[in-house]
């Protein structure tokens, strides 16, 4: 392997070990044994178990942040064109689900291991969570101003949606019976649309518009 390939292989193996054993129970020895390398080789690339764990967390967050920003760009474009707003919201949700589904080990590490395990890890989680909350807050304020959702406390709605999506990822997308990605996105969107639709709205029609492919 080249130096870069070796480094990427170590990250992949470390993700497996952390997902299986947890951060506290895993050790550098576990990683090097599974990677079939000498302990000294590990320290060429990473200073410690904590260092490689933090890099995995950062890799996940950088990618997820890119997804959030691209989703926001698409929805802002839909607002400007005044078309396919709810359908774009649904597409954005599917993009979030897909990102997590394609990274099951990192998702497990972030949501099950990083939160609460270390001040720096938790701070990074909080940072991304705050950014996602700000972005979604702007989007739902715009929907509220356009009459696409009823008069609600946007901050409460955003926290509820983030919570429901996170739970759906952990309990339905990655554990137990694996849902098809599109179906899970449809179920979540329909649930949220029915809860947020303006009074007097034609709910079947609004749901149909939101689920338009």
Image (tube, rainbow, N blue to C red):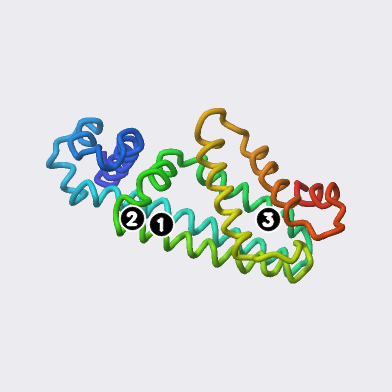
Q: Which mark is residue 121?
A: 2
Q: Which residue is mark 3?
A: 89
Q: Position of residue 173 (x, y in %)?
A: 55, 37
- Which quadrant does the N terminus fall into? top left
Locate residue 106: give its quadrant: top left
- Residue 170 vertical placement versus 116 (above, below): above
Residue drawn at the location 43% of the way across and 55% of the way down: 61
Q: Check disc 2 and report its element: helix, strand or loop.
A: helix
Q: Which residue is mark 1?
A: 125
Give the distance between the C-alpha atoms of the residues marked 3 and 2, in whole angstroms.
29 Å
- Residue 172 vertical placement versus 146 (above, below): above
Give the camera-side residue of 158 and 205: 158
Count neighbours of disc 3 (C-alpha within 10 A) and say few if under 14, some if 14 to 19, many if 20 or more. Answer: many
Q: Is residue 29 left or right of residue 103?
A: left
Q: Which of pointers 3 and 1 lies earlier in the amino acid sequence?
A: 3
Q: Position of residue 86 (x, y in %)?
A: 74, 56
């Amino acid at each position: 392997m080249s130096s870069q390939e070796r480094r990427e292989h170590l990250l992949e193996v470390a993700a497996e070990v952390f997902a299986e054993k947890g951060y506290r129970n895993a050790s550098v020895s576990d990683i090097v044994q599974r990677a079939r390398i000498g302990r000294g080789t590990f320290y060429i690339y990473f200073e410690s178990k904590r260092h490689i764990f933090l890099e995995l967390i950062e890799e996940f967050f950088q990618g997820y942040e890119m997804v959030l920003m691209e989703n926001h760009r698409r929805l802002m474009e839909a607002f400007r064109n005044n078309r396919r707003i709810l359908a774009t919201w649904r597409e954005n949700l599917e993009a979030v689900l897909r990102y997590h589904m394609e990274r099951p080990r990192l998702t497990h590490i972030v949501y099950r291991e990083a939160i609460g395990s270390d001040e720096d890890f938790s701070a990074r989680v909080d940072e991304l969570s705050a950014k996602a909350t700000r972005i979604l807050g702007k989007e739902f304020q715009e929907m509220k101003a356009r009459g696409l959702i009823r008069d609600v406390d946007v901050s409460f709605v955003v926290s509820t949606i983030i919570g429901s999506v996170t739970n759906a990822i952990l309990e339905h997308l990655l554990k137990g019976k694996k849902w098809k990605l599109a179906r899970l996105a449809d179920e979540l969107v329909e649930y949220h649309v029915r809860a947020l639709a303006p009074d007097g709205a034609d709910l079947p029609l609004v749901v149909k518009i939101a689920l338009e492919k």
